[in-house]
């Protein structure tokens, strides 16, 4: 076998370019997998598989969408690798902003067809996300393997290239001193956007989380969960009895059971159609029972009934202390609609220490998961109406550095009914 040194390969490549054997756009093109795309208008309207792309794309959902963060103006060449019959391929078009292009040429690549849509001109005042939309007409189902871009505008363009299409999870980390003995944590949350597959988590601490979810177009939940002790990450059946949290009580209509696959523990939820745009109120309490057990309880204020209700209480082993690591977050737990924006307001946060004193939380630091580091830049926080907000998804411009702190104006006093509830339910 002939072996060539790297500098020899470079010499051959340059020579091939010089005589036209290797097109310049082949070496410069950016390849965006089909499995990173989104289907419109129904995000579940076609199957999407890693390394296979969009499968069985039909005319009932006529749009396949990619978003990229572009940094350069100039011409942008666009090609798409598809599998389908000639009539269906002929009905394709590409849209970027107000520019639309029909196929200019095609060529075969094994069982696929590379469709060339020519070029569009991208004019940018600053780096911004741009939608590239593949639109189809009538005809048989098609498969979309990948998007190929070249030209000056494609240089340094940033795309998520992974099969995971969820928006980044984003967090508010509250700077509470570790030595504070926190026995109550109160937060108000207002959902601004309402895509299915959203979890606006209000009260998080080192042993659990409490918040509200959009589970489907017809179902929403208030959920409260507490982790077991030990290191089992997946299967609660493997958790020894002495490491399991025990259900101590739950409210009317609340389901309680197990959870796994993200650690294990006790899960509870109330199915209730909480309203987007309406403030939801959450309170978690911590009651040490002895040196090794603490009962954590979650209370939600029911707006229609105008009263607090218990979601559930769990006795946690190998604990015996109070809450620490207070935080809130927003999560997109379904990737099919990870292109939709999610936003919620988080305000009027308070915590109480075991000496009965309330402390207002007016500062938070922004953080995000690994997706927000490497794959999705559409994640930020801010202050609106003297509340922190978290926003992610939507491929909206504007991102924030990990660890950025922000402060809101103090409100002054905790809600009176919260003090009454805590005093009633926490033993002195």
Image (cartoon, helix red, strand yellow):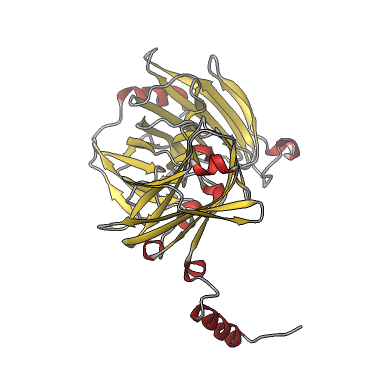
Query: Residue 56 or 41: which is nearer the viewer?
Result: 56
Query: Residue 256 or 130: which is nearer the viewer?
Result: 130
Quick one: quadrant of the N terminus? Answer: bottom right
Q: Is residue 216 above or below residue 153?
A: above
Question: Relative to residue 128, is residue 195 drawn left or right?
Answer: right
Q: Is residue 246 above or below residue 335?
A: above
Residue 274, image x and y in percent?
Answer: 42, 21
- Residue beneath the point at 38% across and 13% down: 304
Q: How many numbered marks does the figure carry?
A: 0
Question: Relative to residue 70, is residue 2 drawn left or right?
Answer: right
Is residue 160 among what the camera can see?
A: no
- Residue beneath the point at 63% across and 35% down: 265
Residue 117, image x and y in percent?
Answer: 44, 52
Quick one: quadrant of the C terminus? Answer: top left
Quarter where residue 300 is shown: top left
Residue 37, image x and y in percent?
Answer: 51, 45
Query: Residue 86 or 100: which is nearer the viewer?
Result: 86
Question: Relative to residue 4, is residue 375 drawn left or right?
Answer: left
- Residue beneath the point at 57% across and 43% down: 86
Q: Is residue 222 above or below residue 235?
A: above
Is residue 121 among what the camera can see?
A: yes
Q: Which residue is the extreme one toward the top?
A: 305
- Residue beneath the point at 66% across and 56% down: 110
Question: Relative to residue 90, is residue 278 drawn left or right?
Answer: left
Quarter where residue 93 is shown: top left
Residue 114, image x and y in percent?
Answer: 55, 54
């Amino acid at each position: 076998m002939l072996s060539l040194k790297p500098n020899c390969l470079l010499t051959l490549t340059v020579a091939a370019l010089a005589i036209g054997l290797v097109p310049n756009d082949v070496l410069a093109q950016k390849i965006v997998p089909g499995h990173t795309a989104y289907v419109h208008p129904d995000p579940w309207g076609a199957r999407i598989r890693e390394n296979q792309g969009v499968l069985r794309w039909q005319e009932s959902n006529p749009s396949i969408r990619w978003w990229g963060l572009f940094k350069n103006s100039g011409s942008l060449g666009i090609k798409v690798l598809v599998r389908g019959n000639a009539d269906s391929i002929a009905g394709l078009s590409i849209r970027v902003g107000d520019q639309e292009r029909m196929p200019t040429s095609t060529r075969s690549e094994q069982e696929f067809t590379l469709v060339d849509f020519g070029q569009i001109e991208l004019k940018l005042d600053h780096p911004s996300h741009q939608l590239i939309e593949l639109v189809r007409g009538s005809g048989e189902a098609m498969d979309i393997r990948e998007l190929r871009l070249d030209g000056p505008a494609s240089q340094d363009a940033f795309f998520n290239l992974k099969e995971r299409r969820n928006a980044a999870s984003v967090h508010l980390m509250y700077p509470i001193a570790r030595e504070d003995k926190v026995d109550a944590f109160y937060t108000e949350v207002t959902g601004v956007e309402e895509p299915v597959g959203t979890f606006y988590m209000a009260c998080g601490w080192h042993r659990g989380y409490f918040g509200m979810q959009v589970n489907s177009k017809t179902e929403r939940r208030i959920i409260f969960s507490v982790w077991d002790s030990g290191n089992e990450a997946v299967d609660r059946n493997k958790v020894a009895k002495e490491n399991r949290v025990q259900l101590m009580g739950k409210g009317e209509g609340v389901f309680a059971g197990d959870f796994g696959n993200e650690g294990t523990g006790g899960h509870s939820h109330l199915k209730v159609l909480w309203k987007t745009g309406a403030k939801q109120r959450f309170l978690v309490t911590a009651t040490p029972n002895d040196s090794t057990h603490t009962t954590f309880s979650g209370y939600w204020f029911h707006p229609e009934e105008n009263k607090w209700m218990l979601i559930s209480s769990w006795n946690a082993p190998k604990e015996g202390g109070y809450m620490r690591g207070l935080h809130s977050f927003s999560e997109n737990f379904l990737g099919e609609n990870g292109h939709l924006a999610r936003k919620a307001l988080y305000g009027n946060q308070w915590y109480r220490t075991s000496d009965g004193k309330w402390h207002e939380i007016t500062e938070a630091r922004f953080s995000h998961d690994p997706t927000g580091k490497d794959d999705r830049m559409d994640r930020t926080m801010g202050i609106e109406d003297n509340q922190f907000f978290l926003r992610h998804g939507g491929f909206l411009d504007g991102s924030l550095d990990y660890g950025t702190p922000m402060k809101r104006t103090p409100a002054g006093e905790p809600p009176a009914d919260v003090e009454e509830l805590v005093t009633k339910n926490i033993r002195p």
